Amino acid sequence: MSGALPQIPVAKPQLDEQEVEAVRRVVLSGWVTQGPEVAAFEAEFAEYVGAPYACAVSNCTTALHLALMAVGVGPGDEVITVSHSFVATANAIRYCGAVPVFVDIEAGGFNMDPDLIEAAVTARTKAIVCVHQLGMPCDLRRIVEVGRHFAIPVIEDAACATGSEILWEGEWQRIGRPHGDIACFSFHPRKVVTTGDGGMLTTANPDYDRKFRLWRQHGMSVADTVRHGSKQVIYEEYPELGYNYRMTDLQAAIGRVQLRRLPELVSRRRQIAAKYENLLKDVPGLVTPIEPAWTRSNWQSYCVMLPGDIDQKVTMQALLDQGISTRRGVMNIHLESAYAASGSHRASTDLARSVAAQTGSVILPLFAQMTDQDLTRVGGALRELMVPPLSLPSARVG
């Protein structure tokens, strides 16, 4: 029966002839690496989110690395963040020689619990990295308040949050304005806006922006566009260590088209999330995601918590057998082998809610091209599986 039904992926970028034409234009221009398209994408992204500065880079991991460097994180420092995130969040901290200090997530959600930050602060704390997990804005106001109280910079891992909004001082503002010191975005294919891969940093600090632009291009004192456009010979210099963290003009051209699509994409994703809520709200024991009144999520992902007696992996396999792709809940970095060694991290709390969220939640398909038939199929299949025969009590943790 399921063999006749098309596979429903967990995510799918929306790309068409507009992106193809944008890439064709750049290919024929002869300038395909970081150049005028990147500059245009940066300006348009900054305008969209309301940030004074935006700097494009190769991906969000490199954005996080540069952000941490800019605020002065170095060997022996500590950075407060969550374990309940993609491994890149903590990896970027370790690239700086610093130690990630993990705090637990909030009850009833997947974001950092602001009440746990103060207890994690030490004399070595150099930054706070909060994550807008799955596109749902975290309690940024309270996190920024803690950061300002202790004079600790706040970096937003906004990898999933392009297009999300937060109610800030009575006004709806887009994530990336920024509200902390620096916000870092991803344009991976699973994100709402994609350039194939790529990232962006936004800030209100001109010195940070200058550093990003220097470091992303090997520490080169003169940008390629300036050197190639000059009527006089210019010798560039390399005053400090830099990296090859550039975005290409090919990627930026796609990003500019995607950015124009963004309002429509977010609107459609919000419709899908509302339909999921209506389909699943009365399933006993199933917890659908909560959107706080002060947030407007872009619904990059739709993650549900399973009833306590329902096994995650068995549920996911049963859905896959019916042609429905899912993903497990967000990983916990401290449980990975790369973080098993002594000194690789410090846990400020027991992280029980983080572990329970990973092992007890499932990310359902959500992409703009989903039809009502797709949604009904996913919702109906999940509803039928929420019964005790799928229980494997020994497999659940937390």
Image: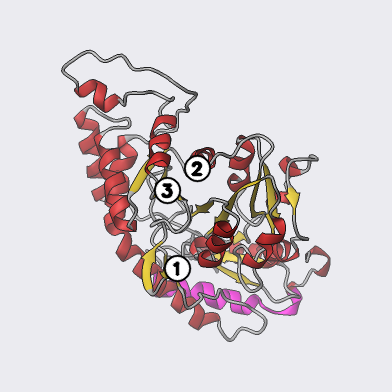
Identify which amino acid the numbered label 2 is placed on: Ala
Q: Is disc 3 surrounded by few (<14), some (14 to 19) or many (20+) residues within 10 Å? A: many
Which residue is tagged 2? Answer: 67
Asked if residue 293 is positioned above or below residue 254 in the image, the reply reads below
| Cα gap from disc 3 to disc 2, whole angstroms | 17 Å
| Main secondary-structure element of the magenta-colored stretch | helix
Measured as percent of width and height from the top left, residue 211 is found at 42, 35
Image point 40% across, 49% down: which residue? Answer: 203
Q: Earlier in the sequence, mark 2 or mark 1?
A: 2
Mark drawn on residue 297: 1
Mark 1 or 3: the one toward you:
1
Asked if residue 358 is positioned above or below residue 347 in the image, the reply reads below
| Residue 323 appears in the rendering | no
Which residue is tagged 3? Answer: 187
Q: Is disc 1 surrounded by few (<14), some (14 to 19) or many (20+) residues within 10 Å? A: many
- Closer to us: 286 or 49: 49
| Residue 77 appears in the rendering | yes
Image point 30% across, 36% down: which residue? Answer: 249
Identify which amino acid the numbered label 3 is placed on: Phe
Which region is colored magenta? 371-389
Q: Name the quadrant of the N terminus.
A: bottom right
The residue tagged with tag 1: helix, strand or loop?
loop
Measured as percent of width and height from the top left, residue 192 is found at 41, 57
Q: Name the quadrant of the C terminus.
A: bottom right
